[in-house]
Amino acid sequence: MKPATTVARQLSRHRRCECQSFLVREARLAPAPVGVLVAAMSLAGIVGALSATRLGRRIGTARAMLLAAAFTGPPALLIPLAGPGGRLALPAIGGMLVSLGVAVGNVLKGSFRQT
């Protein structure tokens, strides 16, 4: 395994743990909704990885990478707005868009390295 890939995976795990800690400690959510949120974020990453090739073929790999980058940063600002009730949807949407964008970007960047 490449060192950069290992470092990226460790950072991803660290951020996920920080998000879980924030949701439980600061937003005061019960563990069950936090588990559902993390599962939804992970599922969006899988969907992004599976759709990256199709998206790259449809709009071009450079445009797809730019679009993925746009879905990576700004939606993360929704996560701190978490709270009980209707505000529970905000970190779900933000985390899902971040996971989707990261997965699409990683698949497309990996395809550039292989060619």
Image (cartoon, grey):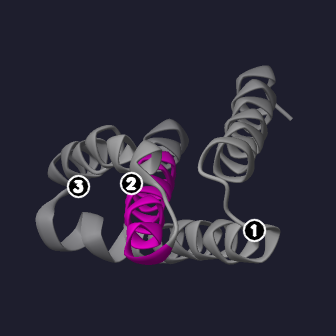
Quadrant of the snapshot with the N terminus: top right
In the displayed structure, would residue 55 be above or below residue 110? Answer: below
User: Disc 1 designates what residue?
Assistant: 30
Number of marks in picture: 3
Instruction: Mark 2: give few (<14), some (14-19) or many (20+) Cα within 10 Å.
Output: many
Vertical placement of residue 16 versus 51, above or below: above
Residue 10 drawn at (x, y percent): 80, 32
The answer to whether marks 1 and 2 mark residues whose Cβ atoms lie closer than 8 Å is no
Residue at the spot of label 3: 64
Viewer-nearest residue: 78 or 57: 78
Q: CA distance from mark 1 to mark 2?
A: 27 Å
For the stretch drawn in magenta, the main secondary structure is: helix
Three-letter amino acid code at disc 3? Ala
In terms of sequence position, does the residue under pointer 1 or pointer 3 come before the other?
1
Instruction: Tell me the distance, in whole angstroms, between the alpha carbons under discs 1 and 3.
Output: 37 Å
Image location (x, y in percent) of residue 3:
80, 21
Q: Which SS class for mark 3?
A: helix
Q: Circle 2 is placed at which residue position?
A: 101
Q: Amino acid at mark 1?
A: Ala
SS for dot 1: loop
Packing grade of label 1 (10 A; few <14, some 14-19, many >=20) is: few
